[in-house]
Image (spheres, rainbow, N blue to C red):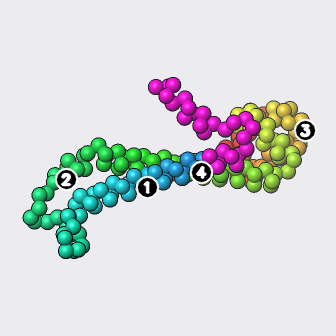
């Protein structure tokens, strides 16, 4: 089973030299293909349901098709709806549309996250950027004393940067013995 899924795992993994635009373009193409296939499959299913329940044989005098009521031989609707072809149309269409919508949601979340990161990076001062990058490297939390050692800034610069970031809502500061524990909020970065 795992060997069957191997080609699909590498389909969406970006290549080392690939830009974000090409990856996004690939996601968009797969999303549109899923939505188109799903829509087409469901449309075929409903067309067959329509033709089964509402289309009667066209009379020789050119009348419009009428519902098959009364006189004709009525087929069993359960057998029609449970035929493999119709089940494949319906379930395949639903799965394809759900997959397309999931890809759309993933793309949307990535885009929102990248916009937040770019906006936050443009609004930060250099010492604030140093603090944020150091917190990212150390799993989004670090003590204030260790933060001063790792960033190369002195304790006063770190204190001021932490205070500014705290007022911006980018970090949380909690007392931790004689120092503070600084936690970077992941939804910002």
How many labels sit on residues? 4
* Image coordinates for residue 174, horizontal then vertical, percent: 70, 40
User: For mark 4, what is the residue?
Assistant: 28
For marks 4 and 1 on the same chain, the one whose residue lies earlier in the sequence: 4
**Is residue 5 rendered to the left or right of residue 182?**
left
Mark toward the start of the polypeptide (4 vs 2): 4
Secondary structure mostly seen in the magenta stretch: helix
Q: Residue 173 carries which label?
A: none
Task: Name the quadrant containing residue 152.
Answer: top right
Q: Does the magenta stretch include residue 62?
A: no
Mark number displayed over residue 77: 2
The residues tagged by marks 1 and 2 sit, at their Cα atoms, a distance apart of: 23 Å
Label 3: element kind: loop
Taking depth in this image into account, of 177 and 149 the one nearest to the observer is: 149
Residue 69: x and y in percent read: 14, 66
**Magenta span:** 1-26
| Cα separation between marks 2 and 3 | 79 Å
Task: Inspect this view and state whether residue 181 appears.
Answer: no
Looking at this view, is 13 or 151 the one in front? 13
In the image as oriented, which residue stretches furthest toward the front?
A: 60
The numbered disc on residue 154 is 3
- Quickly name the residue at label 1: 39
Disc on the earlier residue, 1 or 2: 1
Q: Is residue 3 magenta?
A: yes
Mark pair 4, 2: CA separation: 38 Å
Proximity of marks 3 and 4: CB atoms separated by less than 8 Å: no
Q: Residue at x 51, y 30 (%)?
A: 5
Q: Is residue 63 visible?
A: yes
Relative to 122, is 56 above or below?
below
Q: Is mark 2 on a helix, strand or loop?
A: helix
* Residue at point 73%, 44% (across, down): 19
- 183 vs 69, left or right, is right
């Amino acid at each position: 089973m795992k060997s069957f899924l191997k080609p699909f795992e590498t389909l969406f993994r970006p290549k080392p030299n690939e830009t974000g635009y090409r990856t996004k373009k690939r996601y968009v193409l797969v999303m549109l293909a899923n939505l188109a296939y799903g829509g087409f499959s469901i449309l075929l299913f409903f067309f067959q349901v329509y033709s089964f329940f509402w289309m009667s044989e066209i009379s020789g005098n050119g009348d419009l098709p009428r519902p098959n009521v009364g006189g004709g031989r009525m087929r069993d609707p359960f057998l029609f709806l449970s035929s493999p072809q119709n089940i494949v149309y319906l379930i395949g269409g639903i799965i394809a549309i759900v997959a397309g919508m999931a890809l759309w949601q993933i793309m949307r979340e990535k885009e929102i996250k990248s916009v937040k990161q770019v906006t936050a990076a443009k609004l930060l001062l250099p010492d604030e950027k140093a603090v944020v990058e150091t917190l990212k490297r150390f799993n989004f939390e670090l003590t204030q004393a260790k933060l001063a050692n790792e960033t190369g800034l002195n304790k006063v610069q770190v204190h001021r940067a932490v205070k500014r970031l705290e007022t911006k809502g980018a970090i949380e500061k909690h007392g931790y013995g004689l120092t503070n524990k600084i936690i970077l909020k992941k939804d910002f970065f």
